[in-house]
Amino acid sequence: MNEVSLTREEGRHASLPPRTRLDTAPGEDSTAVPIIMQYFRVAIRWRWLILGTIAVALLIGVVLTLLATPLYTATSRIEINREGVRIVNVDDLQPKSSAVDLEFYQTQYGLLRSRSLAERVARQLRLAQSREFFAAFSGPDAFESLSRGPGGPGAARDRRFRAAVDILLGNLDISPIRGSRLVDIRWTSPDARLSAAIANAWASGFIESNLERRFEATAYARRFLEQRLEQLRGRLEQSERQLVGYASNEAIINIPIPGTDAAGRSQERSLTADSLAALNTELAAATADRVRAESRIRQSGGGAVAEALQNPAIGNLRQRRAEAAAEHARLLIQFEPGYPAVQALAAQIEQLDRSIAREESRIQSSLRNAYQNSVDRERSLAQGVESLKQSFLDQRRRSIQYNIFQRDVDTNRELYDGLLQRYKEIGIAGGVGTNNVSIVDPAQVPQRPSRPRPIINLLIAFLAGVMVGVGLALVREQIDETITDPSDLEKRVGLPLLGAIPKTDFEATMETVADLI
């Protein structure tokens, strides 16, 4: 029962000052009553307002949930690898990234949300010509309204196409799975089959666009390498003609030799160098022969004893002379020197001595001739070597420019061979068509709508009703000036309470008094 309280000084009615805090009288410490209890009293006092607000919020949530159009979300899961399956051992054109680099995946997520991919899906599914597609999102007259407007059929088709792309991007959700290379492509629409078709088309279109970008990069690289190869081919031919022309004019003849140098280039050696090496070898041999001939002459002491000992003819003559000398000595023991047999043996010995002398003289002459021949040959070869040395030094001086031309030829050939090899590798890699994106789970037609979600909607409505109801209760508490507790009056005015007059109907009061009497 509501009561009206009066004090001694007030007379009939009093105008009380407004409260500045919840249930706090002037001069009273606000910490006397815990703040939680103050809010609890407010909630108890305005409980019907809070409960009514919650009920209204729940009712609104239920109505909105029942009136909302069911939406179906289809999910297609793909895997994005940093590198594709390597079928051939050919390096990619794009630089490699580190294992913890997030830039690559952020780029892929951006490509998944790109407008160009949405345009590809719209063209693939012919959404610009689908009345059902526009009716599902913008109403039954959306297709006709987009078809009307300035321009002919082409302009109308472009408007519908742009609108379809905007709808695709507006209902798309790209959700990377944390800590993995998997990405979920979600698309939501009122039609379950349409959601699954667009989610699958989005994944397929992303793979196709990825392959096209790789192919375009490969094609651009091939065109660039073709131009560079043509330029290098001309430079190589020009440098080779310049090298051959200079070698012909300067009479520089080089002979290829087996093997390659440290850089893998074929080696050459000039004909003059080969001739000088061969002639120098012959000169060394001639010098050795001359030294040996001179040594034999010196060892013989001007005779031919050493050579005679090794000559079989002289050895045979010496043996016959020794036999004749022995027979002559034996006959001298028995006969006089004038004995015919003794004289005959003496004549035979003299004849053998002359034969031996002739052979020794012939050998001596042969040694001198051999020595002289060795000296002449050595002198001739030395002159030839000296001449070749001058020719070789002259060729070395003339080969400076030749080597410059040769280096130009080698450099151009290396560049040409390297670009040609790269050109072939790019051709092989482009023909293989590897891809680093694959579909893990294609989107299935959803069986239940993803939105609206009744439980979540009611929970949100309940929380919103609680927040709004509590806010309204606090506002009402601040602007309400009535006093419902007599003790509050004594606290606020600082005067003692004399009594309270109940606020009741007159007839009920009289009946109560009669009962008391």
Image (cartoon, grey):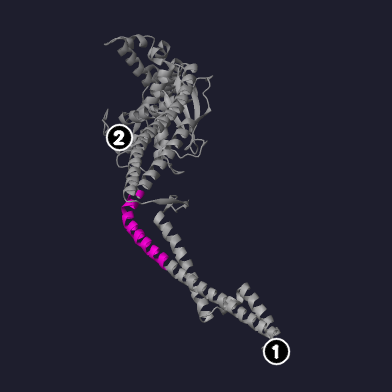
**Res 7 → quadrant:** top left
Question: Which residue is at 46% across, 40% downward?
Answer: 91
Dot 2 amino acid type:
Arg
Q: Which of 285 and 269 is in front in this view?
A: 285
Q: Can residue 47 be seen in this view?
A: no
Q: Is residue 397 visible?
A: yes
Q: Main secondary structure of the magenta part?
A: helix
Q: Which mark is residue 332?
A: 1
Pointer 2 local density, CA inside 10 Å: few below 14, some 14–19, many at least 20? some
Q: Tell me if residue 384 is in the magenta stretch.
A: yes
Q: Earlier in the sequence, mark 1 or mark 2?
A: 2
| Image point (42%, 36%), residue name | 423
Residue 101 is situated, as x and y percent measured from the top left of the image, at: 43, 42
- Give percent across and percent down for residue 352: 62, 78
Any magenta on residue 53?
no
Q: What stretch is highlighted in magenta?
A: 379-406
Quadrant where the N terminus sits is top left
Answer left or right for 446 relative to 107. Answer: right
Tag 2 residue: 19
